[in-house]
Amino acid sequence: MSHLLTVNNNYGEKMKLIKLLPFLVFYFSTHTLFSQGISEEYKQEIINSLSITTFDSCLTVHYGGNAIEAVIEYEIYEAIPVIIEHIWKQGPYYQTRFIDALYQLEAEETEMMALALLDSIDTYEVKERDFTKLELKLLVVQTLFYLGNYEKYQIVFDRINEAKPELAYGAIYLLPEIIWRYPEHEERAKNELIQFIQNSDHDLQKMYAAFAIDTVYGESMIDYYLDLFVSAGDYSIRLVILDDFLTKYKSTQVNNLLRQRLYEDGHGYNRYEIAEHLLKYYGTPSDYKFVKDYQPNELDVEMKEWIESDLTHFMPIGPIDSTISMSKILDTLTSYTNQCYGYEWLKDETYKNELLTKLTNAENYLNAGDSLNCKTEVTAFQISVDMVYQNAEENYPKYVSDEGYKFLYYYSGYIIERL
């Protein structure tokens, strides 16, 4: 379980952020004056409204449920004793919101009040179309989890069972905590998350489940992320999967799917992002050629221009990882040289062999511990590529295209800098 514990500390904060995603646009569009605060008069009006249980849709905060949201939004710490005093006057759901407000305000009474509410819920009569008792309890358990109290974890499974064959969405954010803290229930919690990803009717919920299971199991769940990337009907969900998962877990499998989806994704901006990812995060001659061959086929005129701009300004990815051996980096340049010749970005086999000889000499010097002469050979390689490129007509049949120059000149430059 040690691999699980390494990511546990960041899970709670990440999942809280994920939960807020649907509301962020609304929040920032309707609360532009938030940073300016509120008047003392309005603050007191909010606090006074916490005791009111009737609903009047024509009023802003003259209702406990509305008032508690304002307390959370404006972080009204003075409301803590009033919340505690009037929580039991509210309906069951708003009682859970009062508990959440105490948590948000970091009230020391939060855990005690949450446990008291759990006991009280058992005595409630739940009316038709209201929340079930387990739904209400799950909201309280979520707060307890945030406080570090996981003793009521069984409620999570009870709510999941109650909801079947539907999915208990609120459980998504709590299952990873159970995995970390109760190894005996890991397999069950893991399978429930997989069920969310596979069977939810809502792409957004699938994405939340993917975030949750990724925080625990990482790349081992890549097949589920790839399936969601293909199947999600909402283009924005596909974009999130691309940016958050497929960027993080680079592999031949992911690369192949990106190439497939470049032709198949139904949204122009997604296709542009896929093309950009192939160039930015893979960036081999093969990737560059694939995107270049695709670009004339892009139907969205604006996206077509954007991809063309990315191709024009493309620079090959240098050996960022300092642990990669110089021998392996030289092998990469050798591979690039052969690929460029295969794509006719480098013409004349004799000239290609001249360049490869320089790289062979460089590797021989490197193996002998002579980094100075290794650098000299790579520098000669770079100078030759530059001269042929700059004087294409004079050096015929030697030839280096724009594409070949990008890979051979700049990648050899990365090696020279490192040497």
Image (tube, helix red, strand yellow):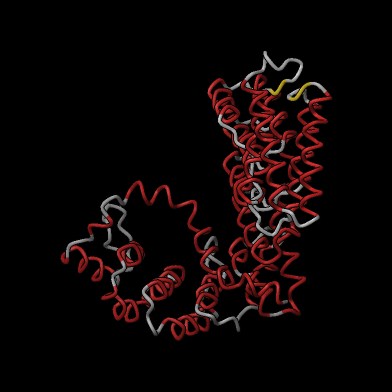
- Confirm whether residue 372 shows in the render: yes
The location of residue 292, given as percent across then percent down, is 67, 25
Quarter of the image for residue 195 reads bottom right
The location of residue 79, given as percent across then percent down, is 28, 75
The location of residue 146, given as percent across then percent down, is 51, 75
Quarter of the image for residue 81 reads bottom left
Compared across the picture, whether 227 is left or right of 203 comes to right
Along the viewing direction, whichever of 80 and 125 lies nearer the viewer: 80
Compared across the picture, whether 333 is left or right of 53 comes to right
User: Residue at 53% of width from left, 23% of height from top?
Assistant: 302
Instruction: Tell me if residue 393 comes above or below residue 204 in the rendering.
Output: above
The location of residue 363, given as percent across then percent down, is 79, 48
Along the viewing direction, whichever of 213 and 69 lies nearer the viewer: 213
Along the viewing direction, whichever of 317 and 379 lies nearer the viewer: 379
Instruction: Tell me if residue 24 comes above or below residue 386 in the rendering.
Output: below
- Confirm whether residue 198 shows in the render: no
Quarter of the image for residue 172 reads bottom right
User: Residue at 75% of width from left, 20% of height from top?
Assistant: 398
Compared across the picture, whether 177 is left or right of 164 comes to left
Specify the quadrant that holds the N terminus.
bottom right
User: Residue at 76% of width from left, 52% of height from top?
Assistant: 366
Along the viewing direction, whichever of 205 and 323 lies nearer the viewer: 323
